[in-house]
Image (cartoon, rainbow, N blue to C red):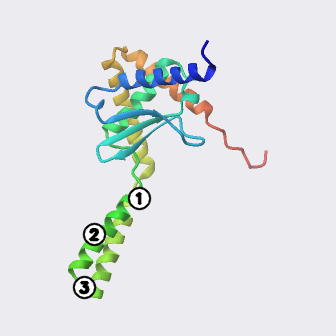
Amino acid sequence: MTSYATSTARAEMSELRRLKGLLPPELQSWVTVETTAAVNPPLITSEEIGKDQVEIQIDLAKWDALATDQRNLLFWHEVARIQNDTIPRDGWEMAALAIGLGGAVGELWVQDGLLLLLALGLVWCCRLATLPKNNGERTLKEATEADEKAISLATRFGYSLPNAYKSLGSALKVLIDQKPQKRLTGKI
């Protein structure tokens, strides 16, 4: 007789293998699917873990509450974000680049004034690169493109177009319903 923990672990591994099989062949070598270890994590997210490696992290406790079609479409939505190269990047990457370039340039030119101006220029460029530009519009555009690509992947894996739209729509509705509502603080 197997314990509850053993059967749960088997079910989780089975789901992760199933999702790995839903990856397009061109992504299977450099995209991994893992369960998240974070506290209060999002349902599904992507993280760049190396130069040529991306990890899709899933909160399997919340994931199991969705129907299989909904899971598939949400998974393909995340895959589409990876294909469109719209997974979030950390600002520290740009700062590290600026520090490295500043150090390299500092070794070449020792004059303090030129080094100071160059460092200020690098910091200014990095600040511009990390500022959110048209953040709302850009996020909406990226989400729409990911939705379209998720529908395309669903049809590639055998879904009819109406069923793919219906599954993605119902999955997004479930996510919206699960999101905690903000309290109204105004007078009634």
Give left or right: position of 172 versus 29.
Answer: right
Residue at numbered disc 1: 91
Which corner quadrant holds the C terminus?
top right
Residue at numbered disc 2: 101
Residue 137 position within the rendered picture, expressed as x and y whole percent measured from the top left: 42, 47
Q: Quadrant of residue 122?
A: bottom left
Residue 85 position within the rendered picture, expressed as x and y whole percent measured from the top left: 32, 42
| Label 3, label 2: how far apart the Cα atoms are | 14 Å
Instruction: Return the residue found at the far right.
Output: 188
Instruction: Return the residue found at the far left.
Output: 108
| Label 2, label 1: how far apart the Cα atoms are | 16 Å
* Relative vertical location of residue 32 with respect to residue 124 in this rendering, above or below: above
Q: Residues within 10 Å of mark 2 (few under 14, many from 20)?
A: some
Residue at numbered disc 3: 110
Earlier in the chain: of badge 2 and badge 1, it is: 1
Q: Report how many numbered discs are placed on residues in the image.
A: 3
Q: Amino acid at mark 1?
A: Gly
Q: Amino acid at mark 2?
A: Leu
Question: Residue visible at 29% across and 73% down?
Answer: 102
* Relative vertical location of residue 57 with respect to residue 96 in this rendering, above or below: above
Residues 18 and 125: in front is 18
Residue 6 position within the rendered picture, expressed as x and y whole percent measured from the top left: 57, 21
